[in-house]
Amino acid sequence: MSGRSLAGNLPSHPAVQGRDVKRLPALALAVALCVTLPACARGTGGGQPTTGVQGSATIGPMCPVLTQGTPCPDRPVPGATIQIRNASNTVVASGTSNAEGRFRIAVAPGHYTVYGKNPSGFQKASAPVTVTVPSGGFASITVTFDSGIR
């Protein structure tokens, strides 16, 4: 561009002749906000969130008797509802674990408590997990459900 303002060139364009050119800066600002605000909510860099909580939802124990040397790993919980609450106990974000029990939920950096609700009819919700989300990254946690097997 040659240093002249874009608005200075617009009146000669047939689409804006006879219109109030003073409104153009406000219109340009409105369009810019509509385009950039959703991107700001996602974070920078291609629309992917840059901070939040990620991890897995598991249930265990899965064996009635644990024997040394015999593995009995916890199992993933697909479809678990994961809620992230702030210090005021307000839900600020939520998501659902995938088929492998994994989740990734975008939230701003800060201190949170994460709760899980199992969709499979287990009566107990997960124990709350406290987490600090760093700036520029994701905090990794495991949300564990008690199977009731003893």
Image (cartoon, helix red, strand yellow):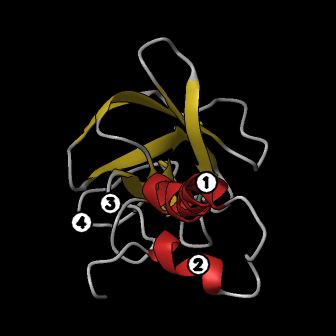
Judged from the image, the secondary structure of the residue bearing numbered disc 3 is loop
Whichever of labels 2 and 4 marks the residue nearer the N terminus, that label is: 2
Whichever of labels 1 and 2 marks the residue nearer the N terminus, that label is: 2
Q: Report whether residue 87 is seen.
A: yes
Q: Report whether residue 149 is seen.
A: no
The one of 87 and 128 positioned closer to us in this rendering: 87
- Looking at the rendered structure, the kind of residue marked 3 is Thr
Q: Quadrant of residue 46?
A: bottom left
x 55%, y 32%: residue: 92
Judge from the rendering whether residue 121 lies leftward or rightward of residue 139; answer left or right.
right
Tag on residue 143? none
The one of 65 and 104 positioned closer to us in this rendering: 104
| Alpha-carbon span between mark 3 and mark 4 | 40 Å
Dot 2 corresponds to which residue?
10
- Looking at the rendered structure, the kind of residue marked 4 is Gly
x 23%, y 56%: residue: 137
x 75%, y 88%: residue: 14
- Looking at the rendered structure, the kind of residue marked 1 is Lys
| Alpha-carbon span between mark 3 and mark 1 | 38 Å
Local packing at callout 3 (Cα closer than 10 Å; few below 14, some 14-19, many 20+) is some
| Alpha-carbon span between mark 2 and mark 4 | 78 Å
| Alpha-carbon span between mark 4 and mark 1 | 78 Å
Tag on residue 69? 4
Q: Position of residue 88 (x, y in %)?
A: 48, 11
Foreground disc of the pair 3, 4: 3
| Alpha-carbon span between mark 2 and mark 3 | 39 Å
Dot 1 corresponds to which residue?
22
Dot 3 corresponds to which residue?
50
Q: Position of residue 107 (x, y in %)?
A: 42, 44
Q: Position of residue 18 (x, y in %)?
A: 78, 70
